[in-house]
Amino acid sequence: EEHPETLSIYSYIASSLSGMLRHKEALALDEKVLEVRSRVLGDEHPAAIRTVYNVAVSQKGVKRCDDAHRTATRGLILAQNIGEEEEAAQFVELLSLIELQLQYSSSNSSKQKRLLKKIEDRKMAKQKAE
């Protein structure tokens, strides 16, 4: 279970589950992959940082926005520490989406909720296209 190819397969399965909106299952796999990659490769390894991103996305998917925000912030710091500018930019975008979701969940206006949902959907579509 610690072989790099096995972890890559787990990560791919988690991504597929997330794409099917099965975020709870995706989160469980992502957390498992992150634990092993962090322990074996170190927190600042690019593969571990990508997995931090996946965990934050899955946490957001299961509406654990506060956890997702903390995780994404941690990932942003790690990416910046090792000069991974592209990864850092992805974390910044994810943090924006999480903040929108936090606003959305605390919003009372249905019009505002619809607008925030459209913005979030467009950003997610852009991320998937990359």
Image (cartoon, rainbow, N blue to C red):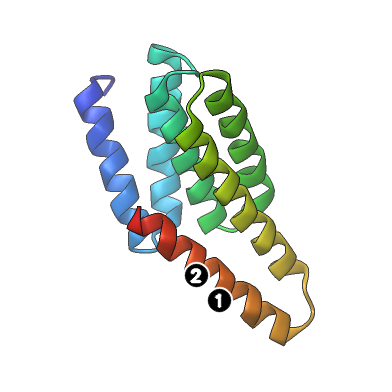
Q: Is residue 67 above or below residue 88?
A: below
Left or right of 56 in this view: 112: right
Q: Secondary structure at mark 1?
A: helix
Determine which quarter of the picture holds residue 39: top left
Q: Is residue 56 left or right of residue 50?
A: right
Per the image, label 2 sits on a secondary structure element best described as: helix
Residue type (three-letter) at the residue carrying disc 1? Lys
* Amino acid type, callout 2: Asp
Q: Are marks 2 and 1 in contact (CB under 8 Å)?
A: yes
Number of other residues with Cα within 10 Å of mark 2, as a class: few under 14, some 14 to 19, many 20 or more: few
Q: Is residue 41 above or below residue 101?
A: above
Residue that extends furthest to the bottom in the rendered view of this protein: 111
Where in the figure is residue 50, as x and y percent of width and height?
42, 34
* Residue shown at 48% from the left, 50% from the top: 58
Q: Which mark is residue 121?
A: 2
How many numbered dots are placed on residues in this image? 2
Horizontal and vertical percent position of residue 4? 24, 22
* Marker disc for residue 77: none
C-alpha gap between disc 2 and disc 1: 5 Å
Quadrant including the N terminus: top left
Q: Residue 111 vs residue 93: left or right?
A: right
Name the residue at 69% across, 48% down.
Answer: 66
Q: Residue furthest left?
A: 5
Residue depicted at x 72% and y 80%? 112
Give the percent coordinates (x, y) of residue 69: 65, 45
Where is residue 13 shown, x and y percent of the image? 27, 46
Residue at the image position 64 percent from the left and 36 percent from the top: 73
Label drawn at residue 118: 1
